[in-house]
Every structure is written in structure tokens, then in C-alpha cells.
Image: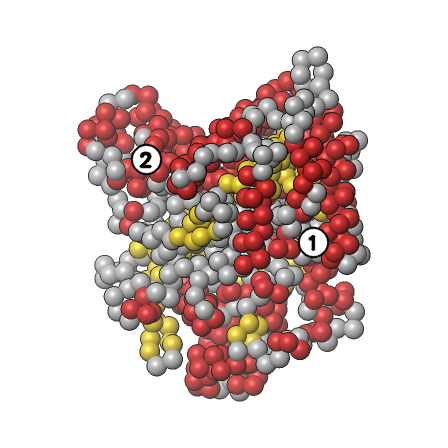
Amino acid sequence: MSENRLELPGELSALDRIANNLHWSWSGETRGLFGRIDLPTWIRSHNNPVRLLMEQSHSQLDALAADPGFVEAVRSRAEELDAYLAKRGEGSARRIAYFSAEFAIVECIRVYSGGLGVLAGDHLKSASDLGLPLAGVGLLYRDGYFTQQVDADGRQHEAYRHLEPDSLPLRREIGSDGEPITVAIEFPGRTVHARIWRADVGVVPLYLLDTDVESNSLADRHITDRLYGGDLEHRLEQELVLGVGGVRALAALGHEIDTYHLNEGHAAFVVVEQLIAAMRSTGSVDTALETVREQLVFTTHTPVEAGHDYFPPDLMHRYFGEIIERSGIPWDRFYGLGMTTEPHRAGQFCMTAIALRCARSSNGVSALHGRVSRSMWRDMFGALSVEDVPIGHVTNGVHLPTWVGPSMTRLYEEHVAADWRDRNGEVDWSGALDIPDHPLWQARREQRFRLIDHVRGILRVQAEARGTPDLGGNGLDPDALTITFARRFATYKRAVLLLSDIDRLAAIVGSIERPVQFIFAGKAHPKDEPGKDFIQQVFAASRLAAMRGRIVFVENYDAELARFLVQGSDMWLNLPRRPLEASGTSGMKSTANGGLNISVTDGWWAEAWEDHNSLEYPIGWAIDSEGMDASRQDEADAETLYRMLEQDIVPLFYQRDETGIPMAWLDRVRSAIAQVCPFFNTDRMVGEYATDIYRLRQTAAR
């Protein structure tokens, strides 16, 4: 029974069950139902149905229970959930464990920072849709990831909001004795305990470990305080709880796991727990390693060094020396599993390295990233040829029912398949080519209007918080060509490339007949000063007289804002320095909503442009300046971007027929939807993992 079980009138009792299964996060009808209860509270709670219901008075709930239309809507949504769970095997045994340092399922459970968490969340949703016997394992960060605040000078500041698990769609895992289940993890000179919280993602359980329990010291209660916070030792402690504690949590809950999937190297301490267990039964290091390899699969997500965790030898020995020695594994043999050949990392223990050495299958997240990863880690394997390095690829996708907006959803139900949300990886998306101009353009306009209205509201609130005038939101035009750059503000993503020639940019955005507006959003890591400088440069540009109302920076990029951006933008702008973008998924979401991409041919876009772009009309625009040094590449890419905007993109968007419809633009939109959606979705992606990597014979319980 959930601790946040609510006292509701009998007619509304099903709301408790609906609120506590995160299936509502990809059911637009159910989200709309919660909005009908109390829209201001729904918004203020960051779309938290448990908090929403807790804040309703008895009289408000009684009034809803007396409304036949609302009661019928509750019954309908409960039947939808029950049918979904029954068809996909609710409560079936878990065989696959998916470990990730972050998961983005819903905004109110803030245990994510960006793309890695969004991908992990979409993975779980599609695993549920496909009926896979999978469980997610992560950490419940009590302060989550930071809330971004930008001051009047454009400098980013970080604030944290404390999570109260009992007011979230979570529940404690309780043992047969009625007490919360905890796991014990050995730390130097002490034992740390972690409690297990559960979120139901359709039929997939997500287990989140939390060290904020009374039996721990004050310092240890803060181990799971902030995502990617603290120093190097704090990071190691979090990853120790995730890897070792996560395996023990699954065992305590009775799951017999066949395959442990490590989503990035943060979870690689799973190897420690599994290796020691295998040593107990085999007594042989070689045999134990083979046993671990048979159980482990690994996905690497970045070719950027900062994305890989390294720990110094003294820290590793302090935390693991004694338990490794007791297990009978020679320390040098264990430590060697994490060694790399990089001279400037000599002697440090690399989490990606141990994961690669101990996995039966390793993969990158796009075809290009697979090739880059094989080259990046070749020396570690002693491979003579890059192609001999045992790293493949499974190209990322997105969970389409989560990200497609309401207007486009209705359009797909009419022209693609009435049940496309239930089987989006199987439908024939060629039906998108037959969507008529007028309804397609109307759907795009509706979603753009929703975006502009939402951004105006955010900018107004942010200006009030700074005590400054709103110099951008009031100028946004719901009919203007709207281009979005929404990324993590890492420098290699080159957010300021568009600002290379301010005069030229001013001419592009300043046209009265053909207005263009750019929306920027994104966070820099708290310790990334160059990334913060990029935010300040974009913010300063938005304050220029020639740019007001045409360039805006929206604070606190999160999953909720992302939905509005991908649903309403006409174009998605992506400017990584090739080949540093492993995949990227936001552009896929934009395409699924009828947006077009202009992107460097890196990550997923290189694959889409080459392999999913064969119809008469291109799926967007590609910037390709491979083979140049960094400064020349920046200059060439900026020139290509300006030229495409001036000569191709803006003219095409404003080339209208007598009814005001940009028919040539919509030809590209239809072409992109029909070619991108069938492949770049997580039903296809998770299906590949299931059959090729998890070795499941059956991938779906449709």
C-alpha cells in the first residue's frame, strides 16, 4: 500500500491508482483530467498528481464526485490504465535490470539533468509498452538537479528544491514485517544503509535508492543529495550506492536478474558486487570474470572525456581494497580492469573502461558514435583494426506518445493509424505523406501558438523575479518562423555560433515581411564556467535593441519546457562540433511534431541524413564541414548556417499560396515525418536491445 494513498470520495477512488502509475505521463487525456481538477495547482506542483490531490479540500473533492462528466472521465481513464497493465503483464518477474544515474519520467520527480535521463525515461516507457520483463534502478536525489536562475547580467545561478517523496507518485518498498526494506553497503570503516522507493512506469518498476535514513550518519544521509553534485569522493559514493546497492536492492526484492544493463559508466560498480559473488561460487578470477561478462551489457553515451568518470588509486583502494582482498581477487588484477592507455590519466580508474572490459556486449548510441567509440577505446583492447574493437551501436530513439503534441496526435490518428500511440514502432508512417496541407498547417500553427503563449508567460515571471522589464516575451510573434536551440550549454555544442556575425543575424531576424525568432534554453553544469559564459553571451544578445523579441533565453530547461519547445518549434537547431555529439534526441522529437532540423551531420542526424532521406523532399538541412580544425570548422559552419537561413530556410517558410499555406515547406515536413518516425523511436530501439542484446525471444506483449 502506498504511503501517499489518498482519502477520496468513492466515486473518485480510482484517481489514487491513476496518480500513482506514471503511465499518465504519456496519456494526454489523463494529464488533461488532472488539469481539470485544479489547473493552477497542477502547474505549480510541476505536474504532480499526488500533490494536486493532497491539496484539494473535502468540499472540492465532493464537488468533483458530484459531477457526472468528471466521474465518467475518471472511470474511462481507470479502464484505460487497467487494460494497458493487463495486456502487458503487470507484476511479471523481472529479468532485465536497467541501471542509470538519472531518469526523466515526469517533471515532479527531478532525478535527471538532461539527455541521458530523458533517454533512460523513454527506454523504460517503451519497455513497458512492449511488455518487457525489465526494472529500472537509480538514485532518489533529495535535492534533485538544480533549478536555473539567470540574473540581470545573464549569469547562471543554481538553486535546489528539496524533494518530499511522500508527496510524489512514489512508494516505499515494505517487507513482510511491515518495515521499509533497506540494503546495507560497506563503506570505509562503516556501513551505509539505503532505502528503496518504487515508481511504477506502466508495468515497469523503477527502484530509486535513498540514503537519507535515520540509521546513517548526517554525512551519509547526504550521499544521495544532489545529482552530479559534490566532489570526486562524493561522486564515487553515489556510484557505489547505485551499483552495489542497486544489485542488493534487486536481490532483496526477489528479482532474479539475467542481464544487467549499465546505461553509461556511472553504474559500473555493479561489476564489483557481481564479481565478488561469482568468486564465492567459483574461486577462480578468470571464471568469475566470465560469469560477470555473461550477465552484463553496457551503453556508452559520449565521446567527450568529461562524460567519463575517473577515480584516483588511493580513493579506490580506500573504498574497495579490503573487500576485494577478502574476495580473493588480486588488487592489481581488479584495478587493471579500470586502467586506460591515456597518458594524462595514468594510474586512474576509469568507470567506462571496467564496463567495457566486463560486458558481453557494448554499444554506442548512433552509427557514427559506434565508429568514434571503437576508435576512442581501440588501444585498450589492443586491436590492430578499429573495426575489431567490440563496440557496436544501437541508435537512440524517442518515446513518441510522450513527446507528440495534441494537435499532431489527432492528425496522426486520422491519417497514419487510429492506434498509432499503442504501436508507434509498427505502424506504416507513409500515411503522413498524404496529410493535406490545410490540416497539417493548422496543427503546426496551433502547437506554435501554445509554445509562444507558454514562453511569454515564463519570460514575464522571470523578468519580475529579476526586477527588470520583459524585453523579449511581448515581442514574440506566434506567426513568425520559430527556431529553437535547446541543449545543455557545453561549449562543444556551440550555442554562440549563431552570434558570430551580429549584423548579419540582425538582418535575418529584423525583417518585417519575413520575421524570424530564436528561442534558446539550456543549463550549464554548475562547475562549467565557459558554458555559463555562453549563456551570458546569448542573454546579452537578446538584450540588444535589434534582437529584442527576436532572440530570447528561457530559464530552467526541463522536460516540461522541452515538450512545448519540440511541439511548437518550426525548426530545431543543433550545432555540435563533429564528432562530439554521440546521438542527441531532441531533434527527433521536433520532427515527430512536424518541425524540421538544421543540424551538423553528427550523432543521429548524420545517420538520418544519410540513411533516412531518400524521398523527393529532403528531411531538413545538413551542415557538413568534416575534417577541419576547430577554428576553421566554426567559421565554415557559421557561414553555412547564415547562408542556409538567408537563401533557403526563411524564403521557403514564407513562400505561400493564395491561402497563406507554405506548401513547399510542408512537403519537407511530411517527408521528414514519414522517414524519421518509423526508425527514430524507442519502440524500435528497445526492440533491438531486447532481441540483439538482452537475448529475449519475445520483445512485445501486444
Q: Name the residue under label 1.
A: 577
In percent of the image, x 42 and y 44: which residue is there? 107
Residue 41 numbered tag: 2
The one nearer the camera, 71 or 162, is 162
In the figure, residue 51 lies in which quadrant? top left
Label located before the other in sequence (2 or 1): 2
In percent of the image, x 73 and y 51: which residue is there? 634
Report the side of 310 relative to 644 (left or right): left
The one nearer the camera, 691 or 320, is 320
- Kindly identify the amino acid type of the residue bearing the numbered disc 1: Arg
Q: Where is residue 520 in the image (x, y as percent from the top left)?
A: 57, 41
In the figure, residue 193 lies in which quadrant? bottom left
Q: Where is residue 636 in the image (x, y as percent from the top left)?
A: 77, 48
Disc 2 element: helix
Residue that extends furthest to the front in the rendered view of this protein: 545
- Kindly identify the amino acid type of the residue bearing the numbered disc 2: Thr
CB contact under 8 Å: marks 2 and 1 = no
